Image: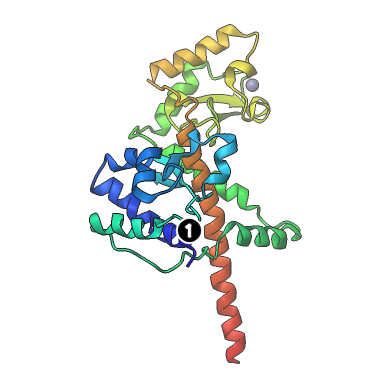
C-alpha cells in the first residue's frame, strides 16, 4: 500500500481535529522533533506555505490546506526505508484522538491540475471563448469587495465626487468620471470596495493606472497624493497592504474557480456521453 496516498486521505480529518478539538496541535504538527517522534518522519508534518524554503518545496505535497487561516502543505516524505512504521504510527495517532482512520488510497480529484491542463489545451483553440480568468478575477474582486461591514449608498459616492471638486482625482479633468479603486482590487494589491478606496477618475486615467500604485502613478504630484491619502483617512480606510497569507488564500480561491469549471465540464460531458449510449 502506498502510505503517502493513505496519509493524504486522512489529512482533512487531522486538520479538522486541530481546528475543533485541540488548537495547540497545529503548532506541534509544524515541529520537526514532534513529527519524528509521532510519525517517524524526517520533516515536520506540515509547514505554512510561506515558510517552506525554495529547496524544500519538493518535500511537500502541492495541495494547500487552510488551517486556522494559514495556508499549509503537508510533507510527502513518508518513506523511511527499512525502519519505518509510519503507517502504524499514523493509525495510533488517529485512534488516540478519536479520528476515524480512512485506509482507502487518496485519488486525485477529477479536477486535478492535469485535468485543468487538458481542458486548457482543449479550450485554447476556441476562438472567442470566454476566458476563465475573467471569472476567476471577478470572484476575487467579489471576495475583497465584501470584507468588513461598511455600508454606503449612491449619495455617499456623490459626496466623494463633490469632495474631489467634480474632477478626476489623478489629473483633475472634469466630465465623464468613473469609479476607481485607489488600491487595485486584485489578489496582489488586496484593495477593497470601501468608500475610502474609491475616487473619481477620468476614463483615460482609469485605463492607464491599471494595477499601478497610486503613489507611483502620481509621481511628481504630491498634492494629489495627499488629497487621496486624506480621503482614505477621512473614511478610515487602511489598505491591507502586503499580506502573503491573504494572497495565498486568494490564489487558492482563484484555482478553485478553474477546478469548479472543469468539474462541471466533466459532469456534463459524462451526461452527454451517457445519453449517447442510451440511444
Ligand atoms: Zn484623469
Quick one: 231 or 159, which is closer to the camera? 231
Rendered view: 2 above or below 210: below
Rendered view: 67 above or below 237: below
Quadrant position of residue 88: bottom left
Q: Which residue is mark 1?
A: 4
Quick one: 60 or 135, which is closer to the camera? 60
| x, y percent for residue 244 | 49, 32
| x, y percent for residue 271 | 55, 78
Q: Secondary structure at mark 1?
A: helix
Horizontal side of 36 relative to 138 (left or right) equals left
Q: Residue at x 60, y 47 (%)?
A: 134
| x, y percent for residue 16 | 31, 51
Q: Residue at x 38, y 44 (%)?
A: 35
For the C terminus, the quadrant is bottom right
Asked if one can make out residue 256 in the rendered structure from this viewpoint, the answer is yes
Horizontal side of 163 relative to 27 (left or right) equals right
Rendered view: 67 above or below 228: below
Quick one: 164 or 85, which is closer to the camera? 85
* Colour setup of the view: rainbow
Quick one: 110 or 186, which is closer to the camera? 110
| x, y percent for residue 156 | 40, 27
Instruction: Decide if ligand 1 comes within 8 Å of the CB at mark 1.
Output: no
Amino acid at each position: 500500500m502506498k502510505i503517502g496516498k493513505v496519509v493524504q486521505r486522512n489529512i482533512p480529518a487531522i486538520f479538522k481535529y486541530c481546528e475543533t478539538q485541540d488548537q495547540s496541535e497545529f503548532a506541534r504538527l509544524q515541529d520537526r522533533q514532534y513529527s519524528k517522534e509521532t510519525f517517524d518522519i524526517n520533516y515536520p508534518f506540515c509547514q505554512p506555505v510561506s515558510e517552506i524554503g525554495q529547496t524544500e518545496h519538493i518535500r511537500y505535497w502541492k495541495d494547500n490546506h487552510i488551517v486556522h487561516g494559514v495556508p499549509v502543505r503537508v510533507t510527502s516524505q513518508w518513506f523511511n526505508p527499512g525502519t519505518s512504521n509510519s503507517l502504524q504510527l499514523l493509525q495510533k495517532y488517529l485512534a488516540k484522538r478519536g479520528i476515524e482512520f480512512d485506509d482507502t488510497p487518496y485519488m486525485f480529484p477529477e479536477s486535478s491540475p492535469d485535468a485543468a491542463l487538458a481542458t486548457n489545451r482543449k479550450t485554447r483553440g476556441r476562438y472567442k471563448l470566454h476566458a476563465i480568468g475573467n471569472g476567476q478575477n471577478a470572484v476575487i474582486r467579489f471576495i475583497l469587495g465584501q470584507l468588513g461591514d461598511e455600508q454606503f449608498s449612491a449619495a455617499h459616492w456623490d459626496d466623494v465626487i463633490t469632495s474631489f471638486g467634480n474632477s478626476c482625482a489623478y489629473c483633475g479633468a472634469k466630465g465623464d468620471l468613473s469609479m476607481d479603486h485607489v488600491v487595485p482590487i486584485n489578489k496582489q494589491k488586496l484593495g477593497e470596495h470601501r468608500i475610502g478606496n474609491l475616487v473619481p477618475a477620468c476614463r483615460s486615467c482609469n485605463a492607464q493606472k491599471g494595477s499601478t500604485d497610486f503613489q507611483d502613478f502620481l509621481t511628481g504630484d504630491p498634492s494629489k497624493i495627499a488629497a487621496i491619502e486624506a480621503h482614505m483617512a477621512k473614511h478610515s480606510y487602511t489598505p491591507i497592504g502586503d499580506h502573503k497569507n491573504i494572497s495565498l488564500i486568494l490564489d487558492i480561491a482563484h484555482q478553485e474557480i478553474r477546478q469548479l469549471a472543469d468539474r462541471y465540464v466533466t459532469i456534463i460531458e459524462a451526461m452527454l456521453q451517457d445519453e449517447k449510449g442510451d440511444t
